[in-house]
Image (cartoon, helix red, strand yellow):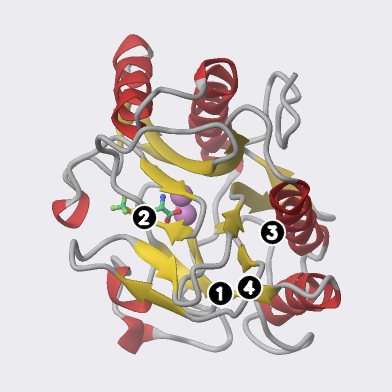
Amino acid sequence: MTDQDADYDLGDYDPAGRNIKIHGPEDFEGMRKAGHLSASCLDMLAREIKPGMTTKDIDDLVFQYGMDHDALPATLGYRGFRHSCCTSVNHVVCHGIPGDRVLREGDVVNVDVTFIKDGWHGDTNRMYPVGNIPRKAERLCEITYESMMRGIAAVKPGATLGDIGAAIQQYAEGERCSVVREFCGHGLGRVFHDAPNVLHYGRSGEGAVLREGMFFTIEPMINAGRPNVKILNDGWTAVTRDRSLSAQFEHSIGVTKDGAEIFTKSPAGLDCPPYG
Ligand code: MF3
Ligand code: CO
Ligand code: CO
């Protein structure tokens, strides 16, 4: 999401984090179900994504999965977006629009799915290799997944949002990659995009203090080249300005007594490639 996408008023921004909702045990249960469903859909796609199919084919599979499981894709009709997921190929950073683009051997595609189940939002994305992919694409996917997991590892009560951003940035830049600045993770729960903004860069110790019961996503976009992005004329598709490869992974998490619970963990153990 961008700052403009937020469903809340950034004028309410409170550095102490008092505007961040605190959730109870029943809310965790709701997020577990929504997260499980979105993650299971991404598991299904790991078997389906192949050279020759279009990004629209992926969107159809996601829509059908939702219908079969009594869940609505949150992106359908969201701020004019008309699809059940985002499909971002190669140098597309995020918010790629499903269409007639044919996937070819060597491409990498990110699929970002958010199902609403019983009112709760499970928001998650993964990278999918299309057939055999170049080693440099494989490496960028590995670095991006590890960046997300290091951000999640920084989560516990008393830590700050800056600790998450710093963990991601230090690792990614240490691997000679760059962190996209224009999009961030976000609070979620009964709403899709809520406070706080979760930046994927920053300084440890800065930003709002995390407390048990907060729900948010961590979804770093990491580029092989420069960090700069531009939005295409369709108003959605974000691409790297230098056309370098970009990767992203996303989990929805809850802050627990002593760490983080990942609501969108893959039930099939397919959190990152290779998928089989
Ligand atoms: N799922 C994306 C996120 O991680 C948001 C997509 S909004 C859309 O926040 F409209 F582009 F689909
Ligand atoms: Co998200
Ligand atoms: Co998402």
Quarter of the image with the N terminus is bottom left
Number of the front mark, 2 or 4: 2
Which circle, 2 or 3, is nearer the viewer?
2
Look at the image and tell me whether residue 177 can be seen: yes
Could you classify mark 1 by the number of other residues whose Cα lies within 10 Å: few (under 14), some (14-19), or many (20 or more)? Answer: many
Is residue 109 shown left or right of residue 99? right
Quarter of the rendering containing residue 206: bottom right
Q: Amino acid at mark 1?
A: Val
Of labels 1 and 3, the one closer to you: 1
CB-based contact (under 8 Å), mark 4 and mark 1: yes
What residue appears at the point 30 percent right and 68 percent down from the top-left corner? 5
Tags 4 and 3 in contact by the CB under 8 Å rule? no
Please provide percent x and percent y for residue 168: 75, 70
Residue under label 2: 95
Q: Which residue is mark 3?
A: 212
- Considering only order in the chain, which callout, 3 or 1, is on the residue closer to the N terminus? 1
Say above or below: 64 vs 200: above
Label 4 or label 3, whichever comes before in sequence order: 4
Q: Considering the numbered disc 3 on the image, is that residue within a helix, a strand or a loop? A: loop
Residue at point 29%, 47% (across, down): 97
Pointer 4: what residue? 200
